[in-house]
């Protein structure tokens, strides 16, 4: 790993869980081979091993190298999109199914943390979806109606209540999702991989896959040095898929960058005012802002933006300016850690599953919410690959999925974030 931005990641600096699994160094024959060491792939490996199946996971870099080890760490129920929109796109029955399954995602994550003693800075004080404008507040009120109709524990906070929980008065209100929380995401996925290995799965790091082929009714997966033969295969590379052509299985998405910047640990006085209960936050703006604290008292701000590109300086200065706007009582803000990751945005903002052959699934397109959904999809994929029953899957898999103009759309998102962040600094 020689990525300077990733090396400066707070999560890599503070992850309590360490995983030292080596590269694949032998040929293996197993029930299921998994490609990709993020939430989806590692959860699937754990589920397979606990059900007594032999599973081999191949990760091109190290566990959590992609979005699973770079994200904000908000453990929320459902997707970004409102439940009613999901049901409109998929139909009432299919939409209700995925909404119901993903509502249980946070509890699956919390259960794993407790069962396996994963050291990942867990908080369970909830998360806050904050209204940045009058239209944002109206959207939150409609979301609250939908959440309550589906039994989710959430409440609308007033401007004053939101200010008390966040330490800033810029928001008009917020939905407080009470039964969710935050984690150190890289530590969590590493701990989950440790649990999978303890359960009997084989996990290999620094093992990029160079080819996948169907041979004599089995799947043959090659790395630069060895092979894995399997009855079933799960492709779980999402936004960090490499130049591996797998026909219909190749993930289709628009890559969108999201960066984060972490301050030095705040003073005791500041910690009493800023997110005193450590809820994680995000707002209703089109160019979203996230905000949270870590266990050491650092303040972490995030937003759409590529901090390795030409506009990196604009995004970096915006983050400092934004924190000063939100918390004018803070002393001069300096960042000790800055990093970013890619989000796999699908055109309809829904995850997609592609069945690309016998006992073969590809999963991608979490569109910015991968912790709970990745856990649910990974577990369901394992059950499907063992039994062949599509009813266990959150959504019906297709045999082909295509998206167009993804590079152009990616540039559009980055341009929009750059312009917005530049203009904000003029106010």
Image (cartoon, helix red, strand yellow):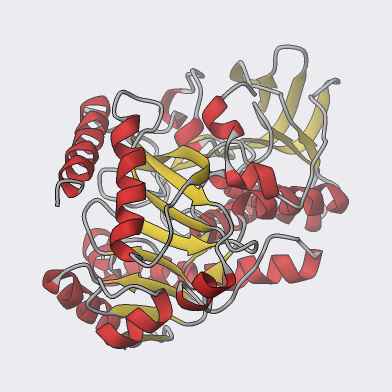
Q: Which of the two residues, 165 or 367, is positioned nearer the viewer here?
A: 165
Q: Residue at x 64, y 64 (%)?
A: 295
Whether residue 130 is situated above or below residue 30 in the rendered picture:
below
Whether residue 88 is situated above or below residue 72 in the rendered picture:
below
Among the 4 quarters of the image, the one containing residue 171: bottom left
Residue 334 percent across, percent down from the top left: 47, 47
Q: Is residue 225 left or right of residue 369?
A: right
Q: Is residue 50 left or right of residue 157?
A: right
Q: Is residue 104 visible?
A: no
Residue 102 percent across, percent down from the top left: 47, 67
Figure disc tally: 0
Q: Residue at x 41, y 65 (%)?
A: 98
Whether residue 292 is situated above or below residue 12 in the rendered picture:
below
Q: Residue at x 83, y 47 (%)?
A: 197
Q: Which of the two residues, 409 or 425, is positioned nearer the viewer here?
A: 425
Among the 4 quarters of the image, the one containing residue 28: top right
Residue 274 percent across, percent down from the top left: 46, 72
Q: Is residue 18 left or right of residue 162?
A: right
Q: Which of the two residues, 89 or 148, is positioned nearer the viewer here?
A: 148
Q: Residue at x 46, y 77 (%)?
A: 273
Among the 4 quarters of the image, the one containing residue 251: top left
Q: Is residue 144 visible?
A: yes
Image quadrant holding the N terminus, namely top right
Residue 182 percent across, percent down from the top left: 55, 66
Q: Which of the two residues, 36 or 123, is positioned nearer the viewer here?
A: 123
Residue lying at the far front in this picture: please name it: 331
């Amino acid at each position: 790993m020689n990525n300077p931005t990733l090396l400066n990641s707070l999560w890599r600096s503070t992850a309590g869980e360490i995983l030292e699994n080596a590269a694949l160094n032998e040929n293996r024959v197993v029930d299921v081979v998994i490609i990709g060491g993020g939430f989806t792939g590692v959860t699937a490996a754990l589920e397979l091993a606990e059900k007594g199946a032999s599973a081999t996971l191949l990760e091109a870099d190290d566990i959590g190298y992609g979005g699973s080890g770079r994200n904000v760490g908000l453990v929320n129920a459902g997707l970004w999109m409102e439940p009613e929109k999901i049901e409109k796109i998929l139909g009432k029955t299919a939409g209700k199914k995925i909404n119901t399954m993903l509502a249980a995602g946070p509890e699956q994550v919390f259960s794993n943390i407790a069962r396996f003693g994963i050291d990942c800075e867990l908080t369970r004080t909830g998360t806050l979806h904050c209204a940045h404008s009058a239209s944002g507040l109206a959207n939150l009120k409609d979301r609250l109606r939908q959440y309550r109709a589906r039994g989710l524990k959430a409440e609308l906070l007033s401007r004053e209540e939101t200010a008390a929980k966040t330490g800033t008065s810029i928001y008009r209100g917020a939905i407080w999702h009470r039964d969710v929380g935050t984690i150190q995401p890289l530590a969590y996925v590493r701990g989950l991989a440790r649990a999978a290995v303890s359960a009997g799965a084989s996990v290999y790091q620094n093992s990029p896959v160079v080819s996948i082929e169907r041979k004599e009714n089995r799947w043959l997966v090659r790395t630069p040095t060895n092979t894995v033969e399997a009855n079933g295969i799960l492709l779980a590379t999402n936004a960090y898929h490499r130049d591996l052509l797998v026909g219909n299985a190749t993930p289709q998405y628009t890559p969108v960058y999201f960066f984060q910047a972490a301050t030095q640990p705040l003073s005791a006085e500041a910690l009493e005012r800023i997110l005193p209960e450590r809820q994680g936050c995000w707002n209703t703006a089109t160019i979203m802002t996230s905000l949270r604290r870590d266990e050491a008292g650092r303040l972490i701000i995030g937003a759409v933006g590529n901090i390795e590109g030409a506009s990196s300086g604009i995004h970096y200065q915006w983050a400092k300016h934004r924190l000063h706007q939100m918390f004018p009582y803070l002393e001069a803000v300096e960042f000790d850690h800055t990093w970013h990751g890619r989000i796999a945005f699908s055109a309809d903002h829904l995850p997609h599953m592609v069945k690309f052959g016998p006992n073969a699934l590809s999963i991608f397109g979490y569109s910015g919410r991968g912790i709970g959904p990745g856990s649910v999809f990974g577990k369901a994929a394992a059950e499907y690959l063992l039994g062949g029953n599509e009813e266990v899957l959150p959504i019906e898999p297709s045999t082909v999925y295509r998206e167009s103009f993804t590079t152009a759309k990616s540039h559009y998102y980055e341009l929009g974030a750059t312009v917005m962040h530049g203009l904000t600094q003029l106010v």
